[in-house]
Amino acid sequence: MLPWIALLVAVALTVPALLPKQTDAQGQRLVLAFYYTWFDENTWTPAKVPDFPAETYVSRDSGAMDRQIAQAQGAGIDAFVVSWYGPWGGANNQTESNFARMLDVAAGRGFKLALDVEATSPFVGGTGSMVEMLRHALSVHANHPAYLRVDGKPVLFFWREQRWSPAAWQSIRDQVDPNHDSIWIAEGIDMSYQSVFDGHHLYSVTWNPPSDVGATASKFSRWVNDARDRYGSYRYWVATAMPGYNDTRTGRGNAFVKDREGGAYYARTWEAAIASNPDWVIVNSWNEWPEGTYIEPSQAYGDQYLGLTAEWAGRFKSGAPIAYTAPAAPAAAPPAAPRPTPTPLPTPDYAAVQVQAEVLNVRSRPSVGAYLVGQADGGSVMRATAKLADESWWQVCCVDGSEAWVSGDWVQPIGPATDLGELPVVAPLLTTRPAALTDRLE
């Protein structure tokens, strides 16, 4: 071979490595968000979730779906990745009927949906069930015009694929999708599944110390690149952004809280995600309320996280490079002096209520929509001057020289029983307390 011909061949062989990272057919950088469809009238209680939606809803409500899709589009989200238990279960499995309904709603807005296939679904008994589950997904849902496709292929995310070995998944795929006509995205930390799957994501990143979020994203990006080389075909890296975490209402023995830091933690996970050069970014989550990872508008945060999502989604889609900067380690605090044992507050000799939350809003009327006149710290005691008949709201005295109201969900009546029983009972004012709302702040 002549030297100049050899040089041309060498250049041709190296060009693919120099090309921009493959994304989808239109060259878009997709922003996705995990979405859940199993909420109903029994969901919205303080015992189950740490906060409440700005507008409570049931997942089967098409109007709620339409509102959420419009909000997500405004925040730069291209598709919801919807948790799915499979086609079985009837009334005991909302995920099938609600996903089908949501596809129709999404089509009306030009929005896209993909399935997050739950390998540990209570309706999946073994690999044979998974084969049937995936056949249904690909033959029914994936043919809907609102289903997410990339390069013409429907996208499937998977949860807990570790239930079976890569060899078992190879057998499943050989039966369902032998030619890889769909895109399968695996989850977790075991990269051996890339021998069967087409990409990888981490469902959660909050188990990292804050200083390691960027290092973890970079590491898994590198491992996905290694899988492309090892298996000789493209693998998608899907980086994760999260606002925080709080699953303390779930009853799990390992429950914990990752503080949102006023939005700073969300910004750091976005920064780390973009710096890892992903194909797509997925937000965990739109509405996983029991785990406290929601970004949809809430009573505690309003639409703050929609604004942050729009900002970071815009940065990602612009293609501008971002370098991750790890937060500075906090300075060591001096040893704390021993705290004295607090003296218990004496029980007042008048009708009163004691705050049972960390912070409680005090309002001008008995309604969560009423004007906020102040806040009361946890454990504080306020004189009670009246109440609603069902004790859902208590009138207290005095905040800024005026009487005000606190939610009965977060106070404990104290004082002489006779005084409490003789408090005036007043009728609800213009706006009564909606069911299943809370006025506690954390």
Image (cartoon, grey):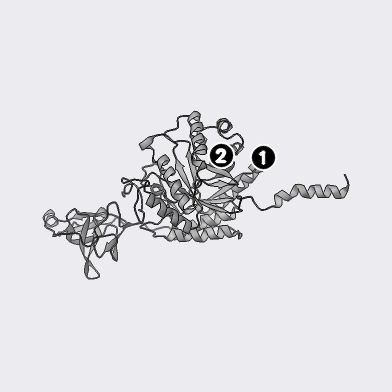
Q: Position of residue 282 (x, y in %)?
A: 51, 50
* Residue 431 visible, this angle: yes
Q: At 38% across and 35% down in the image, what residue appears? A: 90
Q: Quadrant of residue 378?
A: bottom left
Tally of numbered discs: 2
Image side of residue 137 versus residue 361, left or right: right
Which secondary structure, mark 1? helix
In this rendering, would 221 be left or right of 394? right
For the residues labelled 1 and 2, the Cα–Cα distance comes to 15 Å
Residue at image mark 1: 230
Q: Amino acid at mark 2?
A: Asp
Marked residue nearer the N-terminal end (1 or 2)? 2
Q: Where 127 falls versus 211 (above or below)?
A: above
In this view, the residue in front, 8 or 187, is 8
- Which quadrant of the structure image shows residue 29? bottom right
Image quadrant holding the C terminus, namely bottom left
In front of the other: 191 or 76: 76
- Disc number placed over residue 190 in the picture, else none: 2
Quadrant the N terminus occupies: top right
